Image (tube, grey):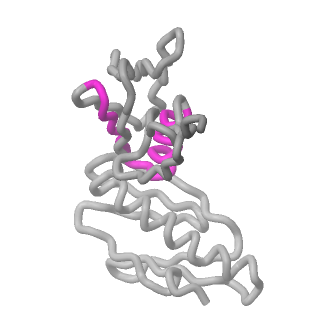
């Protein structure tokens, strides 16, 4: 049985959770999230906690047990406080700016790259080189941050490109002089 799945999920005061079979709706101060959980897991609300358990001893049911617990917990944390990912843009002339809900990135190409924000995601830029992606859906925040990073991934020789804040890039030695 999953160690993660065994732990009950506490429901904060400002958050309401409604269950309809395997469909979960979570409402909080930041917004509302809905998700349908996969088969093989049962979900119950006991007082101010959510408890998940596998419906059978099959491998798929046991695998989904911890996954579903993590998904529901991320929904509750998201509507209560939200999620954010920060990226750094490193390189001469590389910068970003926000125009409305669109992020415009100049990263060494002949043209600027525009990234449209999907519903529930906001972009924030500080000092033209630090981009923060925030929202209530952890999966969507991570995917949008990965899309921005994929515009110009960090290269191993000088470390230029777009990287997550605090990401460590393995550096390589460049060409050595001819002897």
Is residue 140 rendered magenta in the image? Answer: yes
Name the foreground residue: 102 vs 93.
Answer: 93
Which image quarter is the N terminus in?
A: bottom right
**Quarter of the image holding residue 78?**
bottom left
- Please tell me how many numbered marks the rendered image carries: 0
Q: Is residue 162 above or below residue 11?
A: above
In the image, taking residue 4 as reference, residue 99 lies left or right, namely left
Estimate the x, y position of residue 19 in percent, counting from the top left: 50, 66
* Residue 101 in view of the camera: no
Name the foreground residue: 80 vs 96.
Answer: 96
**Residue drawn at 67 percent across, 82 percent down:** 62
**Residue drawn at 31 percent across, 54 percent down:** 28
Which image quarter is the C terminus in?
A: top right
**Residue drawn at 35 percent across, 31 percent down:** 123
**Residue drawn at 43 percent across, 59 percent down:** 75
Q: Which residues are magenta?
A: 128-150
Estimate the x, y position of residue 131 in percent, counting from the top left: 33, 34
Is residue 121 rendered magenta in the image? Answer: no
Q: Residue furthest top?
A: 110
Q: Residue furthest right?
A: 58
Estimate the x, y position of residue 8 in percent, counting from the top left: 42, 82
Q: Is residue 7 above or below residue 128?
A: below
Q: Residue furthest front?
A: 179
Estimate the x, y position of residue 83 in percent, counting from the top left: 35, 51
Q: Is residue 170 above or below residue 145?
A: below
* Residue 131 in view of the camera: yes
Name the foreground residue: 57 vs 23.
Answer: 57
In the image, taking residue 130 as reference, residue 59 lies left or right, namely right
Name the foreground residue: 3 vs 57.
Answer: 3
């Amino acid at each position: 049985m999953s160690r993660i799945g065994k732990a009950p999920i506490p429901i904060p005061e400002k958050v309401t959770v409604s269950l309809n079979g395997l469909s979960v709706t979570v409402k909080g101060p930041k917004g509302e999230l809905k998700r349908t959980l996969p088969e093989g897991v049962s979900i119950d609300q006991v007082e101010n906690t959510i408890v998940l358990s596998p419906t059978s001893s099959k491998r798929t049911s046991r695998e989904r047990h911890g996954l579903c617990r993590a998904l529901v917990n991320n929904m509750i944390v998201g509507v209560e406080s939200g999620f954010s990912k920060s990226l750094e843009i490193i390189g001469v002339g590389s910068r970003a700016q926000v125009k409305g809900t669109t992020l415009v990135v100049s990263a060494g190409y002949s043209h600027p790259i525009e990234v449209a924000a999907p519903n529930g995601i906001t972009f924030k830029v500080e000092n033209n080189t630090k981009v923060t992606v925030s929202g209530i859906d952890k999966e969507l925040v991570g995917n949008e941050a990965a899309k921005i990073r994929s515009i110009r991934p960090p290269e191993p020789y000088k470390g230029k490109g777009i990287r997550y804040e605090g990401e460590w890039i393995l550096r390589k030695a460049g060409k050595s002089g001819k002897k």
